[in-house]
Amino acid sequence: MDFAWTAEERAFAEDVRRFLRAHPPERFPADGVDAGYGSGAHSREFLAALAAEGWLSMCWPKAHGGAERPMFLKLVLMEELALAGAPFGPLPGCWQTADAIIEYGTERLRREILPEIARGVATFWQGYSEPDAGSDLLALKTTARRDGDHWILRGHKIWSSHAGISRHGLVFTRTSQEARRSRGFSMFVVANGTPGMDIRPIRSLTGEVYHYEVFLDDVRVPADLMLGPEGEGFIALLNGLDSDRFWGRFYKAPALERVLRQLVDYANTTFSDGRRLADHAVVRRRLAHMATEIAALRFMFYRAACLIRDGGPITYETAVAKVMADETGQRLAQLGMDVLGLWGSLGEGSPWAKLGGRMSGTYLTSLGHTIAGGTAEILRTTVAVRGLGLPSGRG
Amino acid sequence: MNFHPSPPQQLLAATARQFLTARCPIELVQRLTNMGGPERAPQTPLGGSGRPGKAVAPLDTSGFDATLWRGMAELGWQGLLVPPELGGSGGSLLDVVVLVEEMGRACLPGPFITSAVAATCALMGDGLQKRVLPAMADGERIATLALVEERASFDLDAMTLACDLPGRLTGRKLFVRDAHLANDLIVAVRAGGDLTLLLLPTDRPGVTRVPLATGGPERLYEVIFDEVAIGADDVVGLPGHGRASLVRALRAGALARAAEIVGAAQRVLELTVEHAKTRVQGGRPIGGHQAIQHACADLVRDVDASRGLLYAAAWKAAEGGSAEADIAMAKAYAGEAGLSVARRAHQIFGAISYCEEHPLHLFHKRIQAASLDFGDADLQLETVARAIGLG
């Protein structure tokens, strides 16, 4: 057992902190909202600044322009960025897409897309869900039919985060009707602006636009922009989901820790009933309890990280960690609103706002987290069936 | 970063699993600890008033299997933390955690954590250690901790029993675990201006051990001191300088109890999942229902998350760090999560688990007792509160 960071990891963390001092995150303009997952807002400029350090491609094979640095440096980078509240929103999606392209992408994808990712230019939206295919992804109706050296995509995707401001979509389609329900799916990398693609914003309950729906009306996509083996897309997607849950939530624990630190400062400096909030036993205990939950969450992700690094089999570890991350986040947001009381209802525009007026946004965005990327219910079933071997309810 | 026990630790755990499966089956635990069991001897005070001529009751060994204890000693477990020059193997708290997790899994009864972990840590580094540690390492002597008083707290400020040195000790300690088995008591008193630890044999005149009626299988005692003669030789370390040893013992004890909880909760998880797979109702295993599946998923989360904090805290402690907040977090989290696991398991098992004959309540009661020993969640979370900067 060893819970220490290596010398290389510590040195890299110092590099990242130095970078953050030179590039204060708050100076970077946000192109898209912060959905509260912990990776901050969508900022192309910030992504480009990370790319300029070589950090987007640092773990790729040298043959693809990478530096073959250890995977754990990605964790170090995300942790430092999340603790600083930096706007690195698109980064995890870029990394996952790059990993998929390196693993089974075509020559064209490797030649055209990887360098774009390395430069911090390419960002991606996920075209998975459809109006009638949410938790039951296999019910999707979007089709791709072959036409010479192109595929023609037709369908309706929804809940695609930041689709309107991204460069490419990862569109999951049915490419053939197969006897087995899980066969016959394929993934495409589709450039935004391709004729026939209509991207429309969906206003969230926060009042902001985070999700989009995308209408695909005979969108022609070159065949060599298919990502992964034809007809095996669901298997590839499923394999990807384990890491999706990991990379999509790893930074949540440090991000929650950042909010907790703000609440601790607030409790130390705010008086209520003639006493500091920090001296109220209930506040004190709830904050300490939350710190403990966040620490526990962090080790759940570290353990999953070790499994991913060592190539160990993952059955339930990322699913259980994701559920825990999102539910812990919701409890922290509730705690934050409770500690702030009436002040919590004030937003960023108010001169009276506490903690930047962001707590109600943290609370509201956290509602979506146990739904997006696999609902807490679907994932608990995954833990039970894949992790514990309980009988599948479908049978 | 790496979550795997080292090869020697894996060997330790595998040996423990094998030994405890053979020598501490759940039937033995039931026999030793069930309230209605035939071996639950009527409990009587031990020691009497301590005045000459008074009869001393025979040692009550209920809840204890001496053969099992000797078997553990043959494997060197009681000496795991004891330095080699005193007959132990000089292991670390991380080794202890790996071993105790297996003990929790087996619901092993007895004073291992009290004597071989906490009391041993209290005595470490003191001249007195030469007097008792070799025998404790051999399993020949057992020590327990007499710390808690009427405030019913492991908070050091709640320990107020005063004593002159040399002089006479009069007063009482409560919640003294397994005092009936102990040869020695480690008593926290106020002397020499601050906390002082005394090492007193339980047969010292004036020491009486009165069993407390408990709602579960635990053996807890009130220890009464009536004009007990205390000399300079009885002091662990220096008078007024017991705080560091006491804190070391409490932290080691808390860490070991967290490990016991994690082991017990892991076993509860396994038993429950097995039940969910095999119990058929309405023509299908109950584990095919989402209500049961989701409850089982929460058991996994609680056990895994507790273990992560446990290992990280044990590693830090073994590396020589203070690990104060880490252990507090591990203990607070494991206690709460372990109890939640036990309660949910009862719900999944249904009526059968309400029977004394069924083993679940043994694990549940063990987790409950462990969660209170060496500082409950309130006390641990106060430590965490200070560590996160709440002034």
Image: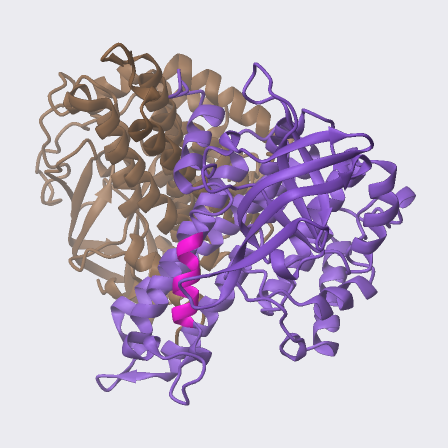
Q: Residue furthest bottom?
A: A351
The chain coloured purple is A
Q: Nearer the viewer, residue A66 or B46?
A: A66
Q: Nearer the viewer, residue A24 or A203?
A: A203
A293 left or right of B14? left
| Rendered location of residue A212, percent (x, y) | 54, 55
Seen at 85% across and 53% down, the residue is A115
Q: Colour of chain B?
A: brown
**Residues in magenta, as a range:** A359-368
Q: Is residue A249 covered in magenta? A: no
Residue at 37%, 28% in the rendered image: B269
Is A361 covered by the magenta stretch? Answer: yes
Of residues B265 and A264, which is closer to you in this image?
Answer: A264
Residue for point 15% across, 20% down = B355
Residue A223 in which image quadrant? top right
Q: Quadrant of the N terminus of chain A?
A: top right
Is residue B124 at least partly visible in the picture?
A: no
Residue toward you, B178 or B136: B178
